Amino acid sequence: MKQLIWILGGFLFFAACQSDEKEVVNVYSHRHYDVDRELMEAFTESTGIEVQLVSASADELIQKLSMEGENSPADILITVDAGRLERAKAKGLFQPVSTPTLQRQVPRHLRDDDNHWYGLTSRARILAYHPNRVERDELSTYEALADDKWEGRILARSSSNVYNQSLLASIIEANGIDSAKTWARKVKENLARSPQGGDRDQIKAVAAGEGDVALVNTYYIGLMLNDKDERVREAAESVELFFPNSEGRGTHVNVSGAGVTRHAPNKENAIALLEYLTGEQAQSRWASANYEYPVNPEVTPSAVLQQWETLNPDTVSLSVLGEKNEAAVRIFNEVGWN
Amino acid sequence: MKEGRGKNALLSGRKGFNLRWRGSMRNYWVVLAVVLFIFISIPLCTIVVKLFSSPGPYWDHLSETRLPLYFYHTILLLLGVGGLTVVIGVVTAWWVSTFEFPGRKIFEWLLILPLSIPTYIMAYAYTGLVDSTGTLTRWSEGIFGVAPSGRWVDLMNLPGAIFILSMSLFPYVYLITRASFARQFSNFYDAAAVLGKSHTTIFFRIGLPLARPAIAAGTALAGMEVLNDYGAVQYLGVPTFTTGIFSAWFSLGDITTAIYLAAILMAFVFLLITAESWQRRHRKYTGEESHHHFHRIQPRRSQKALMTTVCGIIAALSFGLPLVQLLYWAGLTASSVLEIEFLGLVLSSFLLAGGAGIGVALVAIVFLYAVRTARRPFLSTIARWATMGYAIPGAIIAVGLLVPLLAVDRMLIDLSQGSWGLVLTGGFFALMYAYIVRFLAVGYNPIESGFKKVGTQVNEAARTLGANSLQVLWSIDLPLIRASLASSVLFVFVDVLKELPLTLILRPFNFDTLATRAFDLATNEMIAESAIPALVIITTGFVPILLLNHLIGHRNE
């Protein structure tokens, strides 16, 4: 027992000794990419500010942040969709920050109307189809996927996936809630198999002939096209891509983004990190390593992305989509899309 | 066999009870157990009190739309995985501990190894084997010239989930049951064999009834693991009750409903487990330790072939095939993922898991020893209750723990006038605390079944001779149950090695483990890249697994 007390005491001591007087920025992040670590290291190198990172799911981090309240050590929260950013904003976890650099580097529709958060990268939700079984001119909009002709041909993952939720939120915003519900019901009925796996699994299933059209995020295709496994590359190469609604309101995009926390102990450092991450260097690194679309208009997408058709993004405010996210989840539950 | 012995033990227990009542050491155990119970209860209670308040705003919506299906999936998964793990675990444990057949020594430890593969990695690996770009698909193309069409094996459904979860969870049953067979079984076996009973009769009439506490303990662990699994069932498209919890929290932002659902889950599990132990309340499973050398039985050749084949198939399905897939991925990605920092990750994971394993075992011993020395029914009830954390998803436990700890932290900050940071929640204290709450069941069940087998006579004899309870514990009870004790530490060790949500949420800044590293990669669907940390987890689990196997086997050789 004595030993146990010593061990516990040791842990406490260790915990208490953690604060020293370096310049730091404390990050809660839902982005788990290796390239992110690399960028944080580069940031430390150029500014001398050390980045301390905890990564977990955004929802857990939001909960932790709100429970810690004004004692929270976190300076910045990074998520991978706008809905979570809106949720954190609604809980009063962010503070507005605005600098000319940030305003210049992040276009209006990819940041919060009240400057509580800024997009870091964006990804489009597009269609991957098999050219032998689908004519390109059969495809047009997300809405058209509700048509009976697609019965048993569509592939999509679980509705617990946030990108499906934000897509439906954008449809609610564009067409109204009743129409969106009808759409979700029809598409669910058109599914080739019950929702399962991740985006990569949907693309593989198109390649293998289990379905004809899949709803997927752009960067997964980029990753698959450059996979180490030849068979995975072949699968990705055998599908073609279509950007829905590009002639109408634009293709649905979501962002991964970040905001400075309300009680940030190192606010200035947090802003410096935000500016760095939306700056040209970090943006082009992200674009090439992770096949995400840069938010910074000065930075061009990676070569892989440029081979595809030009993205004409739906410029509806992502704040609005964040607010509609809940309604989207309700609809998915009501129509029984797992 | 059981009853006679039971009565004796009970009588001597009563007498001893009065004697011990005066001993001060007994109070010490009970007091310690109650204090620990309070600590462990705090986070559990912050969850359970929610049962008595109203659920959050989305309760109605969820219970009308999704919960019935989730509940249905959960029940079927529990039944399926429960049944399959018992069949596989008990049969293999029986064969390995009773018979001599080719490969037995290898199977002894090989059948434990699937434990070291996290369930979600198992799900990814199996998908990677059989999907259209999969390794097995490719092999069969190489052999037969044509690729099997579409999904020649479909694991992304309820039967698939039952199979995959059973493959990773049956070692719980196997290991605990085997420890129980190994301990004292040979006496009965020899007697029964002399009376001319067949192997099958002996198995059903003696082996199975005697091993019942062990089987129950193992199945309970597997069942609780099924209940809190999120990653695998999510990926396989079989949403369960836990999906409901996270759907309320993550998709709808309604943590009140999430905790309410978790509380329901906890109450459900508590009832189930209480019912099981109530059902076997009057039986005693203690027997005489076998002192003579136990000769393994030499079955007929056809039986030997059957045993080797079946064990081989199970080992291949539960460990070999996933390992092949992971190795294949690792080979593809080694150049980009393998870094020197892995050594640091191994070290930090090892220390964390080892610390948690020992911590949990100490707490479990305190509880069980209090139960054993005091024989107060309320003690075993609170001990049961304290093990409920295993059925609760880690993320919910983290919330239940952060509430009280942050309150204390806030007080400390006020007291120190802001010069202290988040002392309790900023370092490793919260993490260790959480592991104990979460994994007590894992460490408790094997030790409990070990104590049950040992019985109390030796203990009582020693006490009569004037030893105090600490001396008895140290020099008699612990050595007697050392195999169970080792299983306990090992289970927790391997579990913490794989653990995700608690580690993710409660870890200090810039602290990574192998599991968080694997998760970082897998969550981005970079599953091939996550194979290397997953393999390191498996290898790290290897050493203690072999050690444990040696401890259990030792008695037989």
Image (spheres, rainbow, N blue to C red):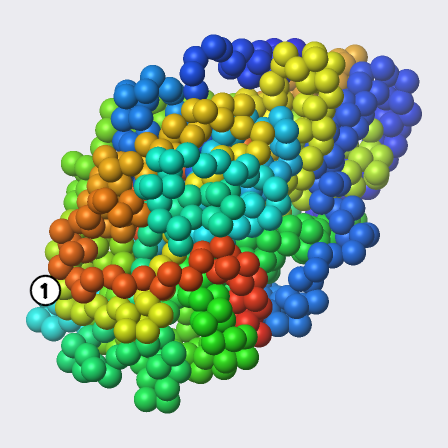
Horizontal side, residue A51 vs residue A219: left or right: right
Secondary element at image label 1: helix
Q: Quadrant of residue B148?
A: bottom left
Between B116 and B64, the residue placed more toward the observer is B64
Horizontal side, residue B479 vs residue B321: left or right: right
The residue shown at (23%, 73%) is: A129
Residue A130: tell me if it is visible.
yes
Note whether B241 is above or below A90 in the view shown.
Answer: below
Labels in figure, total = 1
Q: Quadrant of residue A276?
A: top left
The residue shown at (37%, 89%) is: A148
Residue extending furthest toward the bottom: A148
Q: Percent x, y for residue B472?
A: 70, 18
Between B248 and B447, the residue placed more toward the observer is B248
Q: Percent x, y for residue B115?
A: 43, 43
Q: Percent x, y for residue B288?
A: 64, 35
The residue shown at (77%, 25%) is: B35
Q: Percent x, y for residue B238?
A: 48, 65
Between B68 and B32, the residue placed more toward the observer is B68
The residue shown at (67%, 39%) is: B400
Amino acid found under the numbered disc labelled 1: Gly
Note whether B173 is above or below A234 in the view shown.
Answer: above
Horizontal side, residue A34 vs residue B433: left or right: left
Horizontal side, residue B320 vs residue B543: left or right: left
Query: Dot 1 corresponds to which residue?
Result: B142
At label 1, counting other C-alpha atoms closer than 10 Å, the crowd grade (few under 14, some 14-19, many 20 or more) is few
